[in-house]
Image (tube, rainbow, N blue to C red):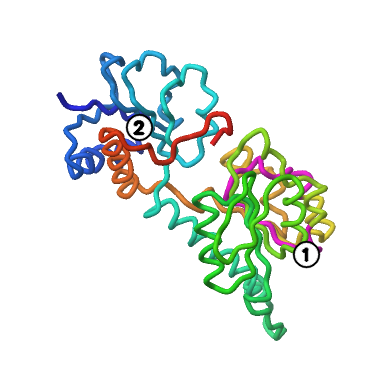
């Protein structure tokens, strides 16, 4: 009997996945039917999920072995009372991780090299300010999960002085790793550029508040491709106005799309990008979903299994 995989996401997502997901499942030898609706929820084996699909009640899916998120962030689903099935976040080295590494590396290099000043120069402004070498630039990554660790590895290869902070102790080659409340202050104290790659949880909301922004060296740069609520917006604007923070490049926000009247749009020292630091790319994500189901059918542990108590 074929497996039944319910695809609960937007119409646009369905257009992207309706052919490649069945093909990916077949490629790993799975006999599976992918459907957008289930006449009998009790016969569904797996749910491929995004919040855009409208599914909120998981109780009828009594046979479902797992809910496989199309997104890396699971804050919109992890607290759902009816969700008793294992929840798996999207973990896709081919697409999601690679995209994040490229975006973070590009923006770190942009700030490191002072590219904005060159772009803004007027004719005749020949200000030959030479940037330091990467070995003399200190980059701190908050969040050392799959995405943060991959970004740290790339920046280390480019010879940046890389440090990182996580809630739990981590060890990464070439990275000075800190953890816990005391470790956060130590990690921030010397950082020229801070990259935020933490999940959104009650413990991480407003992590970068006025006090922590003031720990940073004056003129530090904030790069946030993680989650909007990691930063206290008002505190960041105040720090930008005072010069404590010289620039913030922000890809994620509390409300998305970012409202047209939000001060971030017009602040001269803020760069807004429209949540494109990294995205789930259908071809590689479909292969990842197929591999995950294949592993589960073989009795192997689910990769990317969410810890409900931690929220990610």
State the image coordinates of residue 148 (x, y, percent, origin top left): 55, 54
Query: What is the spatial separation of the Cα atoms under label 2 and label 1, in whole angstroms?
Result: 44 Å
Q: Is 159 situated above or below 18?
A: below
- Locate the C terminus by quadrant: top right
Q: Which residues are magenta?
A: 216-236
Residue topped by disc 2 = 48
Q: Residue at x 29, y 39 (%)?
A: 295
Q: Which mark is residue 219?
A: 1
Report the front residue among 14 and 215. Answer: 215
Question: Where residue 281 sits in the image (x, y, percent)?
Answer: 37, 49
Q: Along the line of sight, which residue is nearer the eye, 173 or 123? A: 173
Say the numbered circle drawn on residue 178: none
Q: In terms of depth relative to the viewer, which is nearer, 117 or 151?
A: 151
Question: Quick one: label 2, few (<14), some, or many (20+) residues within 10 Å?
Answer: some
Q: Quadrant of residue 116?
A: bottom right
Q: Using residue 305 as the reference point, say whether residue 231 is left or right of it.
A: right
On whether residue 225 falls in the magenta region, the answer is yes
Residue 83 screen position, x and y as percent = 46, 21
The N terminus lies in quadrant: top left
Q: Is residue 44 left or right of residue 70?
A: left
Q: Secondary structure at mark 1?
A: loop
The picture quadrant where one finds residue 240 is bottom right
């Amino acid at each position: 009997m074929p497996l039944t995989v319910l695809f609960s996401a937007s119409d646009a997502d369905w257009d992207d996945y309706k052919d490649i997901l069945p093909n990916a499942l077949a490629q790993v030898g799975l006999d599976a039917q992918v459907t957008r609706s289930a006449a009998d929820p009790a016969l569904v084996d797996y749910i491929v999920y995004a919040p855009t699909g409208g599914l909120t009640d998981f109780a009828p899916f009594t046979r479902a072995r797992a809910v496989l998120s199309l997104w890396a962030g699971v804050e919109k689903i992890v607290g759902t009372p009816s969700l008793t099935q294992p929840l798996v976040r999207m973990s896709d080295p081919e697409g999601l991780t690679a995209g994040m590494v490229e975006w973070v590396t590009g923006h770190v290099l942009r700030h490191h090299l002072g590219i904005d000043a060159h772009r803004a120069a007027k004719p005749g402004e020949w200000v030959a300010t030479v940037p330091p070498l990467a070995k003399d630039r200190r980059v701190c990554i908050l969040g050392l999960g799959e995405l943060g660790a991959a970004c740290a590895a790339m920046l280390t290869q480019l010879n940046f002085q890389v440090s990182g902070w996580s809630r739990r102790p981590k060890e990464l080659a070439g990275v000075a790793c800190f953890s816990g409340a005391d470790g956060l202050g130590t990690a921030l104290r010397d950082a020229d550029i801070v990259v935020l790659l933490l999940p959104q949880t009650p413990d991480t909301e407003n992590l970068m508040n006025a006090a922590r922004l003031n720990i940073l060296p004056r003129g530090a740069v904030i790069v946030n491709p993680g989650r909007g609520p990691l930063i206290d917006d008002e505190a960041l604007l105040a720090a930008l106005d005072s010069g404590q923070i010289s620039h913030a490049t922000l890809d994620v926000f509390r409300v998305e799309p970012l409202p047209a009247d939000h001060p971030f749009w017009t602040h001269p020292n803020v760069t807004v990008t429209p949540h494109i630091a990294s995205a789930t790319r259908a071809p590689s994500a479909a292969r990842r979903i197929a591999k995950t189901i294949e592993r589960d059918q073989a009795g192997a542990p689910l990769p990317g299994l969410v810890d409900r108590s931690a929220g990610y």
